[in-house]
Amino acid sequence: MNTETILVLGSTGKTGLRVAERLAARHLRVRHGSRSGTPPFDWENRATWAPALLGVKAVYVSYYPDLAAAGATDAIQSFTDLAVKSGVRRLVLLSGRGEAEAQHCEDIVRRSGVEWTLLRASWFAQNFSEAHFLEPILAGELALPVANIGEPFVDADDIADVAVAALTQDGHAGQLYELTGPRLWTFADAVAAIAQATGRTIRFTQISMTEYAAALEEAQLPTETIELIRYLFTEVLDGRNASVKDGVVRALGRPPRDFGDYVRKTATTGVWATGPRS
């Protein structure tokens, strides 16, 4: 597989960017599956799919916004069918823990008839520095509808390392890797760790789902986005995923990165530097 083109979907996202960078560093042929790629790829424009798949033998499949979103199952089925028809021989799917819809998409890839690897990941550590939690952390308070539930935040670098191994090496076909960090953290603990590492005053506040949805509506998020967020917080973060798994060890032969190490490393970049000091 190392001399053939690899398509990385979501190559501007948290995991896809890391996967593409690692493949490029190995001087492998990488095609960026994004609206800015050449050729472009857009999940919402199926006319872009076939050109992006031309000559591709392996694909990292990252679906935006989430495999639990409306229409995701149909999109994954259609894309998988087209990929196989186009000559793709290996599919690596980024999935999520505790999402029934995501597991339906996993089943589609399993039944594809080509080599497959499933990466069922917990919540990303990088959500605190590269996504929707960053702005409230900079403002000094992260308010979420989450109880005192432990989550084994996984580092996106670990996901990328496993994905690259599955895309380029033998021995990962037919494997389901549940990717988590090495221990559980509550959101309050995570915010406290960031506050300590930055010397800033940052609070975590538990609010109701009704309050959170109202805040999202005030921010003028689309209704379908709000419903997806409601699902993720009320279903995925209800305690069902409060366990550590061995996917990183099984795939890479090393332990996963700890959230505390992520916090200390990220704090040195200055991304959390703005805001009130303690």
Image: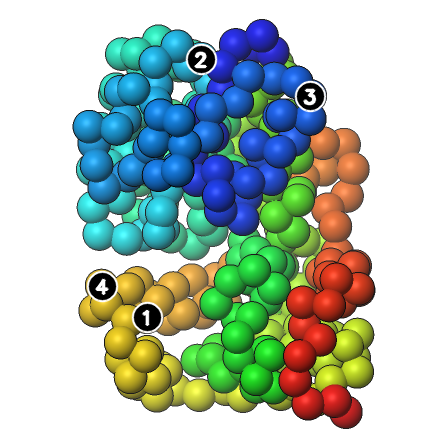
Residue 115 seen in render: no
Residue 16 seen in render: yes
The residue sitting at 22% across, 63% down in the picture is 224
Task: Specify which label sits upstream in the sequence, 1 or 2.
Answer: 2
Residue 159 lies left or right of residue 236; in this view the side is: right
- Label 4: element kind: helix
Q: Is residue 65 above or below residue 12?
A: below
Per the image, the residue denoted by label 3 is 26
Kind of residue sitting beneath label 1: Arg
Q: Which mark is residue 230?
A: 1
Q: Residues within 10 Å of mark 2 (few under 14, many from 20)?
A: many
The alpha-carbon separation of the residues under discs 3 and 1 comes to: 40 Å
Q: Residues within 10 Å of mark 1 (few under 14, many from 20)?
A: some
Q: Is residue 182 above or below residue 184?
A: above
The residue sitting at 66% across, 18% down in the picture is 27
The alpha-carbon separation of the residues under discs 4 and 1 comes to: 10 Å
Q: Are marks 1 and 2 in contact (CB under 8 Å)?
A: no
Per the image, the residue denoted by label 4 is 224
Q: Where does the image place residue 113, in percent across and percent down from the top left?
A: 35, 14
Per the image, the residue denoted by label 2 is 57
Report the mark closest to the observer, 3 or 2.
Answer: 3
Toward which corner of the image does residue 20 lie, by quadrant? top right
From the viewer's side, name the closer residue of 270 and 181. Answer: 270
Kind of residue sitting beneath label 3: Arg
